[in-house]
């Protein structure tokens, strides 16, 4: 029943604007209406709203699979937000009048602060009108943000007193052992690469590359500028080149990265049968090896584990309280 009423309201509200969207040549002036993709709490999510959000999150042309993924992410974000808001409201059930009054006072304080930052009421009112928002929208946004903050704070307080954030020495040791890449990092380098195509006289191309290398050593030029000035092709900066088997980049890049110093420019290198390249070493990072008993290492691990526990606990709360929010269709609910 609720779904039918909501969809009917959407169609009625869309009718005036849709009258201008008659399909050319359509029989009897058939009108085009927006589509209801989801209902979350008292919020109706239209297809046009989803498409606007997708465009904001990833401008430009995208494939159908990416569009669907972004739509789903947006809907899940709204579901999570509504769950937190409903949980925040439930915290004030014992004294609803006093709770509502305190929320309204905080909303008023935030709006006054926003007016102070904007400079005037009329200027803020004009800005709201330009983006199609009202003062009711502003108050609703502020109220929802406050309720969400209260709900998250309530969960964190319970987690703290239940010692859910406690991190044991065994957990720290296990994390250190299972994530060696975070604590032992091989040396790396960034290398710029300009290539010259060999289409005929290889000696002429070699001289061209030599001239470019000589100029690059003495002049402050980017690889793009060198390529443009000497007729080469800019391959940009190859970053984080490591002397490891997992780094599959070309051998000449890895050799130069290991042997050179920052600012060095290579002699011309025959990179293939049809190309000669020159390289410049842009940056080098020394190898790093951290020890488990380093207090800074243990502190960072403890912080990481505590953050992971916080995320897991909040996700558990969201999962158990999602039944408190009306969601249609039910299949859009995030699993965890």
Image (tube, rainbow, N blue to C red):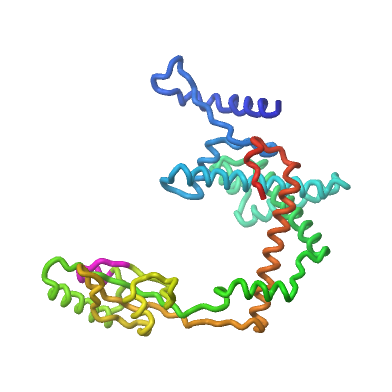
Q: Quadrant of residue 272?
A: bottom left
Whether residue 112 is situated above or below residue 25 in the rendered picture:
below
Q: Is residue 243 left or right of residue 311?
A: left
Residue 45 percent across, percent down from the top left: 60, 37
The answer to whether residue 25 is left or right of residue 322 is left
Considering depth in this image, is 185 or 195 the residue closer to the camera? 185
Q: Examine the image and state in which quarter residue 126 appears.
A: top right
The foreground one among 246 and 182 is: 246
Residue drawn at 70 percent across, 28 percent down: 2
Q: Quick one: which residue is furthest to the top in this view?
A: 28
Q: Quadrant of the N terminus?
A: top right
Q: Position of residue 37 (x, y in %)?
A: 58, 35
**Who's the residue at 68% across and 76% down the image?**
173
Which residue is nearer to you in this view: 328 or 167? 167
The relative height of residue 3 versus residue 90 in the rendered view (above or below) is above
Q: Quadrant of residue 258?
A: bottom left
Left or right: residue 133 versus residue 27 is right
Residue 150 place in picture, x, y as percent = 76, 54
Rendered view: 155 above or below 244? above
Q: Residue furthest front?
A: 245
Instruction: Give the residue drawn at x 20%, y 67%.
Output: 274
Q: Is residue 139 visible?
A: no
Q: Residue 57 appears at what percent x and percent y?
A: 51, 50
Which residue appears farthest toward the right when viewing the image? Answer: 94
**Does the rendering let one see residue 117?**
yes
Residue 23 in magenta? no
Q: Is residue 229 magenta?
A: yes
Task: Please report the bounds of the magenta region as a residue range.
Answer: 225-235
Give 31 or 127, whichever is nearer the viewer.
31
Q: Please count the marks in the image.
A: 0
């Amino acid at each position: 029943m609720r779904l039918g009423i909501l969809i009917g309201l959407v169609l009625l509200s869309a009718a005036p604007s849709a009258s201008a969207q008659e399909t050319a040549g359509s029989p009897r002036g058939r009108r085009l209406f927006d589509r209801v993709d989801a209902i979350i709490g008292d919020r109706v999510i239209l297809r046009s709203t989803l498409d606007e959000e997708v465009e904001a999150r990833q401008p430009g042309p995208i494939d159908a699979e990416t569009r669907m993924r972004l739509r789903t992410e947006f809907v899940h974000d709204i579901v999570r937000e509504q769950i937190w808001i409903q949980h925040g409201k439930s915290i004030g059930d014992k004294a609803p009048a006093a709770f509502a009054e305190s929320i309204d006072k905080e909303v008023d304080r935030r709006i006054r602060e926003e007016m102070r930052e904007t400079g005037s009421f009329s200027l803020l009112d004009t800005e709201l009108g330009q983006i199609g928002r009202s003062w009711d929208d502003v108050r609703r946004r502020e109220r929802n943000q406050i309720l969400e903050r209260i709900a998250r704070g309530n969960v964190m307080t319970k987690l703290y007193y239940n010692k859910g954030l406690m991190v044991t020495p065994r957990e720290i040791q296990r994390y250190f052992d299972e994530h060696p890449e975070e604590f032992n990092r091989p040396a790396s380098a960034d290398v710029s690469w300009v290539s010259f195509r060999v289409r005929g006289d290889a000696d002429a191309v070699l001289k061209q590359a030599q001239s470019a290398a000589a100029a690059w050593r003495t002049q402050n030029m980017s690889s793009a500028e060198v390529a443009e000035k000497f007729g080469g092709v800019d391959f940009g900066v190859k970053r984080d080149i490591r002397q490891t088997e997992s780094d599959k980049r070309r051998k000449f890049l890895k050799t130069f990265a290991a042997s050179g110093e920052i600012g060095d420019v290579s002699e011309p290198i025959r990179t293939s049968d049809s190309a000669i390249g020159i390289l410049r070493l842009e940056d080098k990072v020394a190898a790093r090896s951290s020890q488990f008993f380093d207090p800074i290492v243990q502190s960072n691990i403890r912080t990481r584990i505590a953050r992971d526990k916080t995320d897991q606990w909040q996700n558990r709360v969201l999962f158990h309280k999602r039944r408190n929010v009306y969601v249609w269709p039910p299949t859009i609910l995030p699993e965890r």
